[in-house]
Amino acid sequence: MSDSLIQSDLSELVIGLSSEHSYREITPTHTHTRAQFLYASTGNIQVFTPNNVWIVPPMCALWIPAHVEHSVISLSHVKLNTALVEVNAAALMGQHCFIIRVSNLLHELLIRLNEIEREDTPNTATSQELSRSLQILIFEEIHRANLLPIQIPWPKDKRLLKICQELLHTPDHSKDLTDWADEIGASSRTLMRMFQKETGLSYRAWVQQMHIALALSKIANGESIARISESLGYNNPSAFSAMFKRHLGKTPQQFRSSAMSL
């Protein structure tokens, strides 16, 4: 990070934002004037942005640039320890949403910053210095964090929406586009073209992206690979593991091991 960014209103570099939410609670569509590092320190969340749906696994966060509309659904009891980042500093991260793996250090820093901001003690020079130090460390950790190439493009067409919503709720279904064509009232060839046009992915690739996003949460929650593969409709764990490795470069077991070492 450049000296100019550190010197430009350092006290406002990162602002903590914490809250608790019950299972299935919905935070309606809104925006922030700062970029948001949306992190559930406890529980799982699902986030809708204009073009994607994001299933954010434990120990991961969603980077949302300033002014991007988003809504949040709690998939369990959730504690948010998130951070709002000053716009000029946030510009270093680009103008697109993406998922970031949260290190153990970043996890603790975010919790501590939010604790400071909730404290009723006087705003002493010591607490100001501590807050400034935490802000710098948090921003550096976000900037250096590993990105996860998982996103679920969300279509606008009502027919595709019906398909995607049902797949998201019942990911073990193994319907192909011919099956959907009978339900939707459009040919499989038409649905194939629509999927590519609206999501940038083939139907099969879209389903695999969704499976990976769901699997990451299950892996983090300690579910066995056999149980995860079955819940996603795979005939055997090896088929699921092979698909997972093609996308993320690691098997589910390797991913779980690396996550534990962060």
Image: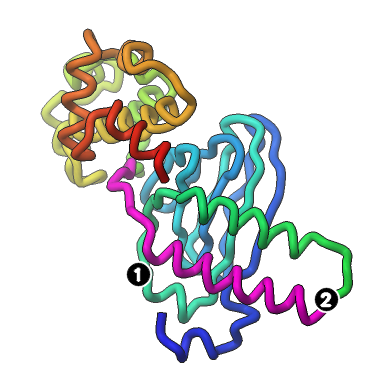
Q: In this figure, which colouring scheme has been used for the structure?
A: rainbow
N-terminal label among 2 and 1? 1
Q: Position of residue 215 (x, y in %)?
A: 36, 27
Q: Residue 217, labelled with which disc?
A: none
Q: CA distance from mark 2 to mark 1?
A: 33 Å
Determine which quarter of the picture holds residue 249. top left
Q: Nearer the viewer, residue 148 or 137?
A: 137
Secondary structure beneath label 2? loop
Q: Position of residue 36 (x, y in %)?
A: 53, 62
Looking at the image, residue 38 lies above or below residue 125? above
The amino acid at mark 1 is: Gly
The amino acid at mark 2 is: Asn
Query: Residue at 83% of width from left, 76% of height from top?
Result: 123
Q: Which residue is mark 1?
A: 94
Q: Range of the magenta residues?
A: 123-152
Q: Position of residue 208 (x, y in %)?
A: 24, 30
Q: Position of residue 146 (x, y in %)?
A: 34, 54
Q: Which residue is mark 2?
A: 123
Query: Residue at 50% of width from left, 77% of height from top?
Result: 87
Q: Nearer the viewer, residue 177 or 27?
A: 27
* Residue extending farthest top: 235
Determine which quarter of the picture holds residue 188. top left
Placement of the N terminus among the 4 image quadrants: bottom left
In the displayed structure image, the side of residue 188 where residue 97 appears, left or right: right
